[in-house]
Structure formats: structure tokens, C-alpha cells
Amino acid sequence: MIQLPDTSAGFAGATWETLASFYREMDAAPLDAATLEAWLARWSRLDELVTEAASLAMIAYTSDTASAAKKAAHLRFSTEVLPQLEAAEVALAKRFVAVGTDRPELQTTLKRFRCAIAIFREANVPLVSEAEGLAAQYQQITGSMTADWGGERVPLPRLSPFLKSHDRAVRESAWRAANLPYLSARDALSALFDRMVQLRQTMARNADFADYRDYVFAAKCRFDYTPEDCTQLQGAIEQKVVPAMLRALEHRRQRLGLAQLRPWDLAVDPWRATSPVPYHDVAELQETAARIFSAVSPDLGGQFRTMMAEGLLDLESRPGKAPGGYCDTLHARGRPFVFMNAAGVAEDVTTLLHEAGHCFHAFASHARPLIWQRHPGAESAELASMSMELLASPHLARPTGYYSDADALSTRLEHLNDTLISLAHIASVDAFQNWIYTDPAGGDGAARDQAWLALRERFEPGVDWSGLTEERTARWYRQLHIFLYPFYYIEYAIAQIGALQVWRNARRDPAGAVAAYRRFLALGATQPLPELYREAGVEMSFDAGLIGDLVAMVEEEMAELRGLLHKVD
């Protein structure tokens, strides 16, 4: 057999022609029940090496979107290698499914493979390639965006501290400056998305689906819920979360002494005379996070320190760096990698806690022998990350954490406030994507903008947007998931409902909740989604009654935090 490289570096410059021989050899190898284990192990290792090489190319490009060489390497993987790899994977999956296995921990993998086989169409390979090229264009456009601030051009994340200024004029100026590049790029981004919609709808039709929404539910292996469940969840959020969000916004308005809240009034901390500065440099951001994770569990703290030591954290904002944050898993070496754009604000702490939850998932599940047993669906991955935000919250105060006692209280209050706002936002994004791909008008840029505005009226009341229609419209152009990862968003709401239950358990029994959380992490992708949630000690649910109970708990905690803040005010 062809010798596999020891590390993914051996595939760093690979083309599909280079890699195809490895997959052809796998496809031609004898396979039966006796040889299945060794065959799966080799296939898994091959996938580990190839996907890690692709991940490293993507990481390099998103870290420096201005580099032509890094862009070319990323595009070689994303538009040439990975679309062709899908066809090779389906061919091998067919062989595995034909032999089969009764091993319980592989039944979810088999179910996923059967789904991939059913929806794969050769005609979609070039469409996937083109779509990946468009995604790279989006990252290049947004990654190059800067704002004129203080006489210099700065990356947009560096405006974040000014959005927290207690000088309302300063935060309005920063908010407008951060929106201006998206207003300027609106036509280019809309045209880009027009083509994305066309490609995705064609993929769906090629695979015999009525529309891309139905195709995605199969492609994402959403075996445990339906589009109707998502619509039910949107309604539950509108019924239970939005009223609570309005009550929280009213507390904010009164505390700030404003007649009306404007969009630039949502980031400032109404309880502190000056916004807390949680850290002064990236080294302090990392070191403090490591202490917090050790307080949650010494093992988790140790894993984070491993990432620090091995240079697996790219946290600072800089020119040319793509926006947003993510955690990617380097499967060949069994390590996660975190990318984000830190700007010296409290949201950076939340982002790092969130992404670290993904990291701990990767560490725990790597013990599973096969790559397909480790990587869970997004609903499970986001449960890991959102739960970590809440499990870490009792440890935010010094000496363990970032803040004084009073600042920790206000930060926890703001986090819960943001939880309500984000659930409403998630519902609007999911409803918007459902509309785009099920309504014939979804391919029209002007119609999309109007649909977005209507949904924001439904899910985002309580803020005065008068005179800001273009800026309000531009919000969806900033949502990279809509462009790069279509329909990857409702998972955040499903996971948030689960994470609030993890937090409820932790309020009663911290050690027991963390133990259940870690058992869930270790399962990886070896169980159906509802079973994974149950292992974490929670229920996967779209029920308005449960959501109402959780929202009541959030509001109770927020009231308690306000009371404590009044005492130190």
C-alpha cells in the first residue's frame, strides 16, 4: 500500500491528483467483515491528514486574507481538493455500508454515510467548488474592511471599546464607522449572494429536493428534528424570549436615562461608570482563561495550557485578518485551534470561553479511534461551547478571573441580557434563511432586504432604528454564517436551551453538572443527538413551556444581580 505521510505537512502542497491515488487504493482494497477494522483505520487516518492540511490552509488564509499565496493554497483545498474528496468519500462509504457492522458506537456514522450516499450527485461537485470560491471572496471583502478612526485606518473589531463609551456621541460615531464599510460593499455582497443562492438551489434540484432548505436538512444529517420544529422554536422564542428581552431593554433604558434606546446604546455597561478592561494584552487574556478553566476542572485548565504552549491560539485583531471567531479541529494531531479578533472588551472573554468549549470537545472526543466518531453535529458542538460560557461565569472575579467583584456582577448581568437578545437574533436569522430558500423571491436582493427588515421588526422590538434603514439592513450582510455556512444558526438556539439547563443543574450541583458535561464531551458523535443531550443531563427541546421556565430562571438571576449591583452602586 502507498505509505501515508507521518503528519499533515506531507499533504500541505497536495493537489487532488496527488491525493486521488490514496483514495483509489482504498476503493480497490479487499473488504469484508474480517478486514473492515484495518480498512476503516487507514481510511480514518487518511481523512485526518487531508482534512488537517485543508484546515491549516484555511487558518493561514483567514489569518492573513491579503496574502495571495495563502489565498491560493486555501482555494486549492476548498475549491479543488475538498469537492473531489466528497465523491471519493461517498464511494468508500458505499463499501462500508455494504459490509456493515453491528458495533453500537458506529451506528450514527453508518446513518450519516447512508444519507451522504443518498444525496450525492456528481453534477454538484463543480457547484460546490464555485460556492467555495465565492465564500473566499466574501472573506477577502470583509477581511479587508477598515474604518477611519482617530486619523488612522483600523480593523473593525478595534472599534468595539468605543461602542462601550459612556459618551453617547463617541459610541454613535464608532457604531456608524463600523457599519459604513458594509454599506459601501452592499452591492458587491448582494451580487455575490445572488450567485450563492442560485448555486445552492441548483444543488438541491440536482439531488431531487424541492429546495435548498430541504436539501440542507439531509446534508446536515438533521435526523432528530424538522423544519417544522424550527418554525415552532421561532414561535416559542417570540412568545417567551422577546417579552423578557423587552423587559431587559427597558431596565437598560431607564438605567442610562434615555428617552429611547438607539442601536449604539446596546453595548455600553449601564452599571459601571467606565467599562471594565478585562485584560491588557493577549498573554493576560490567555493566562486568566487558563485559571478559570482550571477552576471549572483542573483537566480542562491543563488542556488549555497545552494549546497555549503549542501556539494553537490566534486571538488578536490585526489588518487583513478575517472577521469573527472559530475553533477548528486538527484531527491528525488531536488538537483544536482557536481564531478570534480580540479588541480588549468583555465580549472577547465570552468568545474565548465559548471557543474553548469546542476545544474541550475536541480533546475529549479524540480518544475515539475513528474520525467520524469524534466530530459531532453543530447542535452538540454548540452545546459544548455555550455551556462553558455559563459554567465559567462563577469564576469571572479576581483572583481567578478578569474582574473586580462589581465588574464581574455587571459582566454576568450583561451576558444574560445578551443571551436573550441572541436567542431573538438567532430566530430571525433562521427564519430569514428559511424564507430565502423556500420563497421564489429569495434570489432577489431587494426582496431579501425587505424580508430581513420585516423579521427584525418581529424579533427585534424595543430599539429605535428611525433613519437607519440601510444600517439595519446591513446587519445580515455581516452575518457570515448566511454566506459561508447556510442554515448553520438554529443550532445556536437549540444548544442555548440545552446550555441553560446545564447551568440550571450547575446552580444546584456544580461538580455533578461538570461531570455530566464532560461525559457528554467524551461521546463525540457516537450517539443520536437526543442521547447526547441526555448524557449532559439536559433535554433537547423546542417546547415553549420549557423555554419559558428557563427564561424565568434567567430573569430571576438578572434581578438578583441588579440587586447586588444597587448595593455597590
Image (cartoon, grey):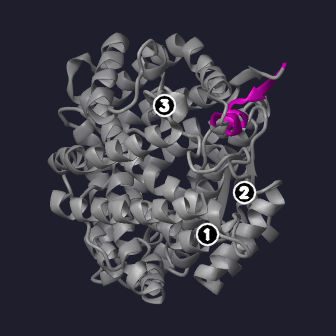
Q: Which dot marks residue 73? A: none
Question: The C terminus appears in which quarter of the rendering?
Answer: bottom right
Q: Which mark is residue 278?
A: 2
Q: Is residue 50 visible?
A: no
Name the residue type under label 1: Met
Q: Is residue 238 left or right of residue 80?
A: left
Compare marks 3 and 1 and give the one earlier in the sequence: 1
What is the span of residues highlighted in magenta in the rendered image? 151-163
The residue wearing badge 3 is 258
Q: Position of residue 38 (x, y in %)?
A: 50, 80
Q: Inspect the image, locate mark 2, and give the three-letter code of the amino acid beneath it.
A: Pro
The residue under label 1 is 1
Mark with earlier residue (2, 1): 1
Image side of residue 181 versus residue 152, left or right? left
- Alpha carbon of mark 2 to alpha carbon of mark 1: how far? 54 Å
Foreground of the two, 229 or 93: 229
User: How far is disc 2 from disc 3 in space, using C-alphas?
Assistant: 27 Å
